[in-house]
Amino acid sequence: MPLIDHLKELRKRIVLVALGLVVGAVAGWLLYDPLLQALQQPLVAAEEMRGNEMTLNFAGPMAALDLKIKSALFLAVFLTCPWWLYQLWAFITPGLTTKEKRYAYVFVGAAIPLFLGGALMAWFVFPHAIQILSGFLPEEATGFTNAQEYLSLVMRLLIAFGLAFLSPVVLTGLNLTGVLPAASMAKGWRWAVLVAFTFAAVMTPTPDPWTMILVALPICLLYFVALGIAWLHDRRQARKLAEL
C-alpha cells in the first residue's frame, strides 16, 4: 500500500477504536461504583493490617467528576478489548491474502486472554506492593491517600501490564507480514530480556527483587513463544519457496 493509503487506513482504525471506547465508556460510567470499590480494595486491606481505616481524599470539587470520567474510560479499555485488538490486527495486516487474514481470529482469540492475563497479574502484584510501601509509615501515622493519584496508578499498572503481555501477538503479526524475520528476533533476544526486566523494575513500585522477577519472567517467556512461532512460519515459507 502507498504511504497515503496507510495513513488513511490508520485514521479509519483510530476512528473505529474511538467509537468503540465511547460505547464502552457509557457502560463504564454506569459501573463506576463497583469499579471504585474493587480498585481501592488493595489499599483497604493494607490499612486494615495496620489497624487504620482507609479514606480516599478528593482534592477539589471537580476531582470526583474527573475521576469518574477516567474510570469510565479505563473500564472501556477492558470492555472493548476484542474490538480495538481486532482493529490493531486489521491495520497491521492489510496486505495479507484472504487465507492469511484468517489469522485475525487466532490473533484476537490469543490477544484477549493475554491482555486480560497481564492486567490480572498486575492486580495480584499491586496489593503486595501497597503492603510493602505502607510498611514504611511510622506506627502511629495516618496516611491520607489522594484518590486521583492512587486510582490513576492502579489504572496505569493494569493497562501497562495488559499491553506488555500483548507483545508476542504483535511480534507474530509483524513476522507474518515479513517485517520482522525470526532471525532478527533471535539475535535481539538479549535486548528483549533487558527490556522486560527494565519494564518490570519500573512498573513494580517495590524494593524487593522477587516481585520484579515474577513480572519479568512471563514477559520473557512470551517473547520466546513468539520467536518459536515466527521460526516455524519462516521455515514453512522457506520450504514453499524451495519447492517452487
Image (spheres, rainbow, N blue to C red):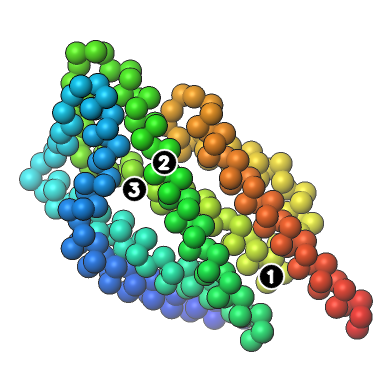
Q: Residue at x 25, y 41 (%)?
A: 40
Q: Earlier in the sequence, mark 2 or mark 3?
A: 2
Question: x, y percentage for residue 172?
Answer: 65, 63
Q: Secondary structure at mark 3?
A: helix
Question: x, y percentage for residue 213?
Answer: 57, 34
Horizontally, residue 4 falls left or right of residue 172, namely left
Question: x, y percentage for residue 185?
Answer: 73, 54
Q: Amino acid at mark 2?
A: Phe
Front residue of 15 and 225: 225
Q: Amino acid at mark 1?
A: Leu
Q: Earlier in the sequence, mark 2 or mark 1?
A: 2
Residue 172 is at least partly visible in this image = yes
Q: Quadrant of residue 74?
A: bottom left
Q: CA distance from mark 2 to mark 1?
A: 33 Å
Q: Residue at x 46, y 24 (%)?
A: 207
Label 1–label 3 contact, CB within 8 A: no
Say which residue label 2 marks: 124
Q: Farthest top residue?
A: 139
Q: Amino acid at mark 3?
A: Met
Q: Residues within 10 Å of mark 2 (few under 14, many from 20)?
A: few
Front residue of 116 and 8: 116
Q: Residues within 10 Å of mark 1 (few under 14, many from 20)?
A: many
Q: Earlier in the sequence, mark 1 or mark 3?
A: 3
Question: x, y percentage for residue 49?
Answer: 27, 24
Residue 92 is at least partly visible in this image = no
Relative to 119, is 47 above or below? above
Say which residue label 1 marks: 176
